[in-house]
Amino acid sequence: MKGHWMGRAALAAGLGLLAGQALAADLEERMAPSEATVDFAAQSPWQIRVRGLGVITNDSGSVNGIPGSDLSYTDTVIPELDISYFFTDNIAAELILGTTYANVHADGAIEGLGKVGKAWLLPPTVTLQYHFTDFGAFKPYVGAGVNYSLFYEQSGSGRFSNLDIENKVGAALQVGFDYMLDDHWGVNFDVKKIFLEPKWKVDFDGAPLTGKAKLNPWLVGAGVTYRF
């Protein structure tokens, strides 16, 4: 009799323990925020990146009326800031800010004329991006947009004077990725192609020259990502 009572007690205790564990698990599941809630609360739509940027120009151009004339330009490395806003997990807009300069050299049939001059360039660029979200911490993206290049602090060199390069609107294409180290910090690699062919004019020994500078630079950058 005592054995039966003890067996029933043990069975009841076991059932009670299982019920308690099930209740605790159910309460924990109900109290835990959903994954969507965690993501929404943790992530702001704003993101910034700070990059080191290589500006690699296409050495091509021309002087009107001089067959075989060409131009070449110096490549530069500059700091760059971009600001992104995510409309959804996949769609974002990016604004890049930075400034660089280019030394312009005569080339081709006019190579002997040497350095034409120097100009600074402010090229704010806005792209609309699509971000792929199926690869965990690895987040690749592609983008396309518009660039407006503003030339300033322009000066001729040697026998060249009054260098003037027109401001120009051009298209921009982009591909890159972020690799997120946690919810906020990551590393970034980014490549952009800017289509930029402004007209220019300069005086050579007082005589006016005109032409087109086919810069069409590649912008290759790497840096740090911060998602607010």
Image: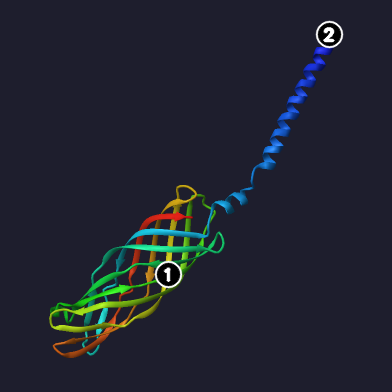
Is residue 212 placed above or below 48 in the rendered structure? below
Callout 1 amino acid: Leu
Residue contact at pointers 2 and 1, CB within 8 angstroms: no
Q: Position of residue 88 (x, y in %)?
A: 57, 62
Q: Is residue 150 left or right of residue 201?
A: right
Is residue 148 placed above or below 201 in the rendered structure? above
Q: Indicate which disc, 2 or 1, sits on the residue closer to the N terminus.
A: 2
Q: Is residue 157 left or right of residue 123?
A: left
x 39%, y 61%: residue: 190
x 47%, y 47%: residue: 182
Badge 1: few (under 14), some or many (20 or more) residues near its Cα, within 10 Å? some
Q: Quadrant of residue 125?
A: bottom left
The residue beneath circle 1 is 173
Badge 2: few (under 14), some or many (20 or more) residues near its Cα, within 10 Å? few
Q: Nearer the viewer, residue 51 or 132?
A: 51
The residue beneath circle 2 is 2
Callout 2 amino acid: Lys
Q: Position of residue 105 (x, y in %)?
A: 19, 76
Q: Quadrant of residue 174?
A: bottom left
Q: Quadrant of residue 74?
A: bottom left
Mark in front: 2 vs 1: 2
Is residue 118 placed above or below 143 in the rendered structure? below
